[in-house]
Image (tube, grey):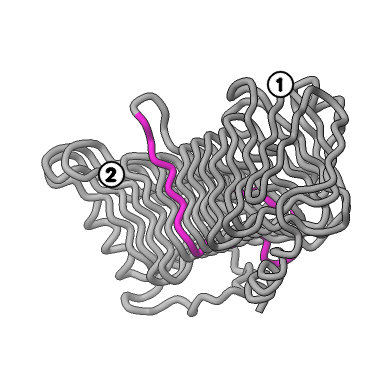
Amino acid sequence: MRLAFFIMAATAASLFSLPSGHKVKQGDVQVTKSEKELLIQSGRRAVVHWDKFSVDRGERARFQMKDSKSSVLNRVSGGERSDILGKLESNGKVYLLNPKGVLIGPEAQINVHSLVASTLDVLDEEYLNGNELRFFGSEKGSIVNMGEVEGHSVFLLAGSVENHGKIKAERVALATGNKILLQPKGEQRIFIEASGAEESIDNRGKIEALTTEIKNSSPYVLAVRSSGTIEATATEKRNGKIFLVADKGTVEVDGTLRASQVDMSGDQVYLYGNALIDAPEGKVNIGRLTPTRNVVLFPESKVTVSASEMGDAGEVYIYSEGATAHYGIIEACGGLKGGNGGFVELSGKMDLGLEGRIERGAPMGTPGELLIDPKNATITAAGGPLPTPSLTFGVSSAASLSITGASLGSALDSGPVTIE
């Protein structure tokens, strides 16, 4: 219903053809408008206020800047959401700030060097200085992408963020909160101050980026959900990385995350349905960035750091402050033609349930190691199943490891097992 509402509202946007009512606050800016196109020409850095900033189907808004390091901060103050249904292009950085929200429609095409779309505000002085930016605000507007966005970097910052379309860039960040810090450089660029607001991030589309950050600080049950595909493809010089963080909320994944390194943490982390974490010869960290209370890998979910033909498998670390339950599949196998198995560690400070498969074989090398780190250990009879997992999974008072004899036997068949 929510998505249908956005589509219906987008149809009405044709009444507000092209951005209008501009006032230049900083910098040298020239605006030229024709029937179907708006051209914004600017120098190194500029600030422009708009009454409305929407682009209808068949229309194009084009920023022509000095170079790719140049930027224009566009602040929309007319009280209406920005609907980008046509084309938005730029050879530089475009900041689009609208507290009422931003909709990128299903036929929209955005091709810019950099895009920062936000329902939050920022101080002009910080923007003009070109250093870190502190976004702030209490508006509950949303950013929804149903189209195609391509650039060097794409940042979507709002009270709630949804991606149903495709985003392709070297760096992509989806973040929600009332106070968000955007750093000009670094492995992680987004930092969020904890908030008590109800915020959520939902990725059902496709993200292709060298580095992807999806971060939320909301204490509400569902903070980050990814049922689409995120691919952080590595290059010769840099590894692809994905960060999914919900400091006080829940991270749910039932789609695909593909990268050299995947980091996930939250109050609770659930992998279920068709969840696939694919990091060939790489590293998967769950519960290491920030303390994570519970981690559940449901049946059919899969985490793999295996090598393909030649090479050593990677590493999988799964930690929880409370309970960890593994019912799915973890693979850390060496290459078929050469290479050793990888390393897998499962830890639960209160409870650790293990009924899923953990493969660490190496046909032409040394099998990998499994380290199980519970508070206490209890091995049930072979074939004795653990309780069926659910999204209300919690910590029992047993404070122990529960593992079936069959699962332990299977783990031993695949390589050495250490229980600490």
Q: Answer whether residue 216 is magenta in the image.
A: yes
Q: Please name whichever residue, 401 or 16, is drawn nearer the observer in this view of the structure.
A: 16
Q: Which residue is mark 2?
A: 368
Compare residues 289 and 54 and report the one nearer the observer: 54
What residue is drawn where x is 34% and y is 27%? 236
Q: Secondary structure at mark 2?
A: loop
**Magenta region:** 214-235
In the image, 353: left or right of 306? right
Q: Which mark is residue 43?
A: 1
Residue 70 in the image: above or below residue 73: above
Residue at figure coordinates x 55%, y 76% from the top left: 390
Residue 180 x %, y %:
77, 41
Query: How far across and down, in percent of the image, does residue 361 sit?
Result: 22, 50
- Which three-letter amino acid code belongs to the residue tagged 1? Gly
Tell me whether the residue at label 2 lies in contact with that at label 1, contact meaning CB atoms closer than 8 angstroms. no
From the viewer's perspective, is 42 left or right of 171? right
Instruction: Tell me the kind of residue under disc 2.
Output: Gly
Q: Position of residue 367 (x, y in %)?
A: 23, 44
Q: Is residue 322 visible?
A: no
Q: Is 239 placed above or below 401 here?
A: above
Residue 346's x, y, as percent? Answer: 46, 52
